[in-house]
Image: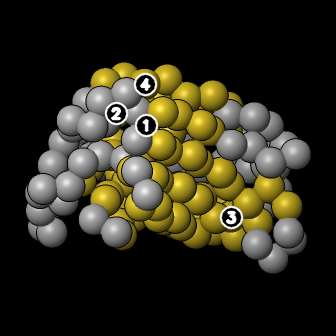
Amino acid sequence: MRAWLALVVLAAAGPVFGADSDCGSALPAAARQQVAGAGWVVAWAPSRWPIPVGQHFSLQVQLCADAGRALPTVLRVDADMPAHRHGMNYRTTVKDLGQGRFQAEGLLFHMPGRWRLRFDLGQGAQAARLDQELDVR
């Protein structure tokens, strides 16, 4: 089973940052990660760091856009293990906290190894996939 978070952002307003952004600066610093591309930034921090094997964890997520660009209207998050060709065994839920902030619950990496978090973003006809790989031990 593929675990997807599907979220439609109702408003295009939200944090706007330039190339030297502090996107996600309110997230816990020790665990904060960023991935950027196509004029958007996804900043995220897991509830447990390092991410444990076999234990549920959540993500705090902050979406940001370059100046003059709207926030994505769609966000999907998935995790998989490319080398093993499988994803998570659990379906994740997400809560919109407003202003480009979200809480994703129910993630679980059931085995150690290289995991890839996939953030699929869309705004109108524009779309981007931003990936971040993690070694989970």
- The quadrant in which residue 9 appears is top left
Residue highlighted by disc 3: 115
What is the distance, in whole Å, between disc 3 and disc 2 at their CAs? 23 Å
Where is residue 18 shown, x and y percent of the image? 12, 62
Classify mark 4: helix, strand or loop: strand
Q: Earlier in the sequence, mark 4 or mark 1?
A: 1
Q: Residues within 10 Å of mark 1 (few under 14, many from 20)?
A: many
Residue highlighted by disc 1: 60
Q: Residues within 10 Å of mark 2 (few under 14, many from 20)?
A: some
* Front: mark 2 or 1: 2
Reply above or below: 56 against 121.
above
Q: Nearer the viewer, residue 106 or 68?
A: 68
Residue highlighted by disc 4: 96
Residue 31 visible, this orientation: no
Q: Residues within 10 Å of mark 4 (few under 14, many from 20)?
A: some
Q: Residues within 10 Å of mark 3 (few under 14, many from 20)?
A: many
What is the distance, in whole Å, between disc 4 and disc 1 at their CAs? 10 Å
Q: Residue at x 34, y 69 (%)?
A: 38
Query: Are circles 3 and 2 on residues that touch, CB within 8 Å?
Result: no
Classify mark 3: helix, strand or loop: strand
Residue type (three-letter) at the residue carrying disc 3? Trp
What is the distance, in whole Å, between disc 2 and disc 4 at their CAs? 6 Å
Q: How is the image coloured?
A: secondary structure
- What numbered label is drawn on residue 41? none
Residue 49 appears left or right of 25: right
Residue type (three-letter) at the residue carrying disc 1? Gln
What is the distance, in whole Å, between disc 1 and disc 3 at their CAs? 18 Å
Query: Are circles 2 and 4 on residues that touch, CB within 8 Å?
Result: yes
Residue highlighted by disc 2: 101
Q: Earlier in the sequence, mark 2 or mark 1?
A: 1
Q: Nearer the viewer, residue 22 or 111?
A: 22
Q: Earlier in the sequence, mark 1 or mark 3?
A: 1
